[in-house]
Amino acid sequence: MSNVLPRKTFAIISHPDAGKTTLTEKVLLLGGGIRSAGTVKGKKSGKFATSDWMEIEKQRGISVTSSVMQLHYKDVQINILDTPGHEDFSEDTYRTLTAVDTAVMVIDSVKGIEAQTLKLFKVCRMRGIPILTFINKLDREGKEPLDLLAEIEETLEMETYPMNWPIGMGKRLSGIYSIPDDTVEVYNEDHERTVIPYKEATQLADHERETLEEEIMLLEEAGNEFTMEKVQNGELTPVFFGSALSSFGVQSFLDQFVKLAAEPQPRRASGELVAPDNKDFSGFVFKIQANMNPNHRDRIAFLRVCSGSFERGMEVVLSRTGKKMKLNQSSSFFASERETVDAAMPGDIVGLYDSGNFKVGDTICTGQDRIQYEEMPQFPPEKFAKITAKNALKHKQYHKGIEQLVQEGTIQLYKTPYFEDYIIGAVGDLQFQVFEYRMKNEYNVDIEFSYMSHELARWVTKGELKDNMTDSRKMLVEDQQKRPVLLFENEFALRWFQDKNPDLQLATGWDIL
Ligand code: G4P
């Protein structure tokens, strides 16, 4: 059992196509003892997800279920939590980031920072976790390295510190210089890893040396000061350049990752910090996955272990209700072959069979005091639809299904004032599909969707609301806690409204916990 190894638990934040899958595959190849749940999306390698957990998954040939992968590297157990992107982007992608201790931001050197990276970055920023940056596709003609650093600093308001520096790019790429080691990893077509001291890198042309030395000097003079404290607080991101596709720079990245990534840190629960080495076990549910095995109609609650140690069969308390429960055989590590886990440490993820007890954000613990980890943030939805049951006679199942699925965190629910029309909100289309599928399969209700053109939600946190707040460009609704929320069609409608109503204070969701 590897449970004595220190844990480094991370997820990749990136925009589709930046190279998350490729980098994950290359990192897994470098570490032994891979255990994975599902497979890496693998659309390129032809390895479609082998799981048959969800019909949707099969139909679409993608891995909807976010997976947990494990590797051992240099006496560290690395847990990688997959963050579904693309069309499978959903609130679960955000929630996964609440369960990691480090984020790796993968940026395409040609495109720079893109929209989805920015959204995911916000969750990491809120949590103040370390962010390591991998600037990918160095084998392509991309933006200038100095410009990329400036872009990160300006867009994300985070200091950068390059750990290595490219020598050329695209067709002119001849190597990367490692700043801490004063070595060069030579780029060659056959992807053989060759690392040599800089002084001995005779294959570098004079002009390459000149440019490199000039740039390194500039970085030394004008660059930021590296401190581990800034890295750990997410104020400074160590930046690595490389090419995941040709495995170039991946091993040096991983060598530094094990040093720079955070081990599980104390987390705030019930107003106090709970340290991972606290003797009492505690953890929180960050995601609930349904129907992973269609034959059993079961659900799995993904638990992040935060303190103490998890043991199969242990008795715990669900903090929200005070209910005692035994985590017996039903607890399993979440792996492709659902392997039973006997023990898990802070930083690990455990899959718990769930018959409807858990809610996203729930804490379970042992010990005298019932503690509650901080609630999940309100992730701002960007897609909305009015819903009704196709068959009005099924209203009982309809309401029951919605209540359950909202509680699980599958979808967000809003209602219009007075008429109480149901409006569902999501961050990605996948949530609508999963909702529709589960309403049909678990509650036998067909849903009629009327998709709305609204894209922005703003919580009204201060000011007097007038009755005529709904018109063709915006709609007033209430969230589950009966808080007033305005849905806008676009930024223009939002700005127009703000100009006309300067006394109203609007929050984006991120800012109301
Ligand atoms: P994602 O998970 O972030 O969506 O990205 P993924 O790894 O699937 O990579 C997206 C595309 O970028 C793939 O190409 C992949 O091969 C390519 N790619 C990844 N890393 C690098 C790199 O270092 N250099 C270059 N030049 N390309 C890279 P594709 O055209 O979508 O698929 P394929 O048919 O080429 O495999």
Image (cartoon, rainbow, N blue to C red):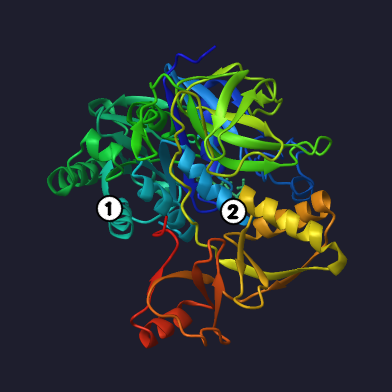
Residue drawn at x 28%, y 55% is: 157
Residue 366, given in percent of the width and then of the height, sits at 50, 24
Seen in the picture, residue 508 relative to 486 is either above or below; the reply is above
Tell me the CA gap for discs 1 and 2.
33 Å
Left-right relation of 226 to 27:
left
Tell me if mark 1 has few (under 14), some (14-19) or many (20+) residues whose alpha carbon lies within 10 angstroms of its own. few
Seen in the picture, residue 449 relative to 25 is either above or below; the reply is below
Looking at numbered disc 2 in the image, what kind of residue is underneath it? Ser
Residue 460, given in percent of the width and then of the height, sits at 43, 72
Which sits earlier in the primary sequence, circle 1 or circle 2?
2
Task: Spot the residue most to the top.
Answer: 1
Secondary structure of the residue carrying tag 1 is helix
Name which quarter of the figure residue 420 lies in. Answer: bottom right
Of the pair 207 and 41, the residue shown nearer to us: 41
Which labelled disc corresponds to residue 146? 1
Residue drawn at x 12%, y 46% is: 221
Residue occupied by mark 2: 90
Of the pair 127 and 173, the residue shown nearer to us: 127
